[in-house]
Image (cartoon, grey):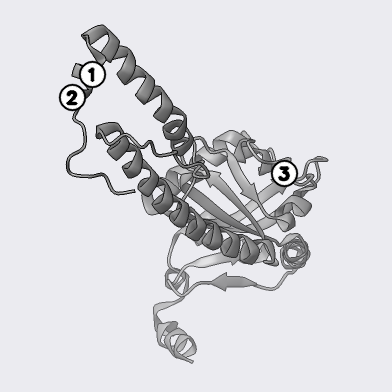
């Protein structure tokens, strides 16, 4: 509804009202009529529009402006809902467990069905709980572990690693976790964490480690940076070093200088 240029002004309305006291009540009545709609907008409810009065004054113009704003917000909400629904469908159908945690309160805002099943919770049961409920107790408190991870995330915006998790029934299992920060349309800054169950992988690694530890042959694993990641007991004991010493120095320190060139050829190949 367009408001005519010769609309009544507030002063004209005041004259019609006859006195300041009466006009004050007149203004309060007008504003009280608008209040429920503004409260609805503030709560995210854009379903109701203001019925426009035939009176042509500043309050009518304000009501028209609010209705235009409500229409714009309705369209924006539809777009947000479409995007949220699409993202939700993608996450819900992922093969890995995914959950969303508020960056400020560290409470779970969302968990897909795979994540809920992985941890043995009913649909929606994890919502509102502190993220530390997924961390298995070790020599550190679960909340302390969560605090350390959060510290890294706040500095770098991401974190990845292997975590010993715990199900609702107390069963522990291992997950490979990737966490990143994301700006959510509703919750603001959140953490998106993707959990992949690697329990079987850890069992195989443990069996291999036992075999390596019992072997009398030298067995080691080195990385591209030139450091050992693993040395078996036979190796560090026979060489006269502690395991810690061998893992803290470049592996070339343990090779005779005359044989460095042989090692360089092997690395190159």
The earlier-in-sequence mark between 1 and 3 is: 1
Q: Are marks 2 and 1 in contact (CB under 8 Å)?
A: yes
User: How busy is the neighbourhood of tag 1: few (under 14 within 10 Å), some, or many (20 plus)?
Assistant: few
Element type where label 1 sits in the image? helix
Determine which residue is flagged by label 2. 12
Q: CA distance from mark 1 to mark 3?
A: 58 Å
Residue 28 has which mark?
Answer: none
Q: Is residue 183 above or below residue 198?
A: above
Say whether residue 76 is left or right of residue 54. Answer: right
Query: Would residue 218 be visible to someone looking at this image?
Result: yes
Please give the name of the residue rendered at 42% of the width and 27% of the height, measured from the top-left corner.
Answer: 33
C-alpha span from label 2 to label 3:
57 Å
Left or right, 147 with respect to 110, comes to left
Q: In x, y percent, where is residue 32?
A: 41, 23
Give residue 210's position: percent from left, percent from top: 76, 62
Give whichever of 16, 238 is nearer the camera: 16
- Determine the image quadrant of residue 109: top right
Total numbered labels:
3
The residue beneath circle 1 is 16
* Whole-percent x, y for residue 228 in the image: 52, 67
Q: Residue at x 44, y 89 (%)?
A: 268
Q: Residue at x 53, y 38 (%)?
A: 106
Q: CA distance from mark 2 to mark 1?
A: 6 Å
Indicate which disc, 2 or 3, sits on the residue closer to the N terminus.
Answer: 2
Residue at image mark 3: 124
Please say if 162 is above or below 263.
above
> Helix, strand, or loop for circle 2?
helix
| Closer to the camera in the image, 139 or 69 | 69
Residue 163, above or below 40: below
- Select label 1 or label 3 by which is in front: 1
């Amino acid at each position: 509804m367009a408001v005519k240029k010769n609309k009544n002004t507030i002063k004209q309305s005041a004259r019609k009202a006859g006195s300041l006291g009466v006009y004050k009540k007149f203004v309060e009545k007008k504003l009280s009529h608008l209040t429920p709609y503004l409260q609805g907008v503030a709560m995210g409810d854009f379903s109701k529009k203001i019925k426009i009065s035939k009176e042509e004054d500043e309050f009518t113009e304000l009501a028209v402006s609010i209705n235009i704003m409500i229409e714009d917000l309705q369209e924006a909400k539809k777009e947000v809902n479409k995007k949220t629904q699409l993202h939700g469908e993608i996450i819900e159908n992922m093969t890995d467990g995914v959950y969303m945690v508020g960056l400020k309160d560290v409470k779970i805002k969302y968990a897909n069905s795979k994540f809920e099943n992985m941890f043995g919770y009913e649909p929606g049961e994890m919502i509102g709980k502190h993220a530390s409920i997924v961390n298995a107790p070790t020599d550190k408190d679960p909340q302390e572990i969560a605090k350390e991870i959060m510290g890294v995330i706040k500095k770098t915006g991401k974190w990845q690693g292997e975590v010993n998790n715990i199900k609702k029934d107390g069963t522990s299992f291992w997950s490979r976790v990737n966490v990143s920060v994301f700006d959510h349309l509703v919750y603001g800054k959140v953490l998106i964490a993707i959990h992949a169950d690697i329990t079987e992988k850890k069992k195989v690694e443990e069996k291999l480690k036992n075999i390596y530890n019992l072997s009398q042959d030298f067995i080691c694993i080195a990385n591209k940076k030139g450091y050992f990641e693993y040395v078996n007991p036979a190796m560090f004991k026979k060489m006269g070093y502690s395991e810690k010493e061998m893992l803290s120095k470049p592996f070339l320190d343990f090779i005779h200088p005359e044989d460095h060139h042989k090692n360089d050829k092997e690395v190159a190949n």
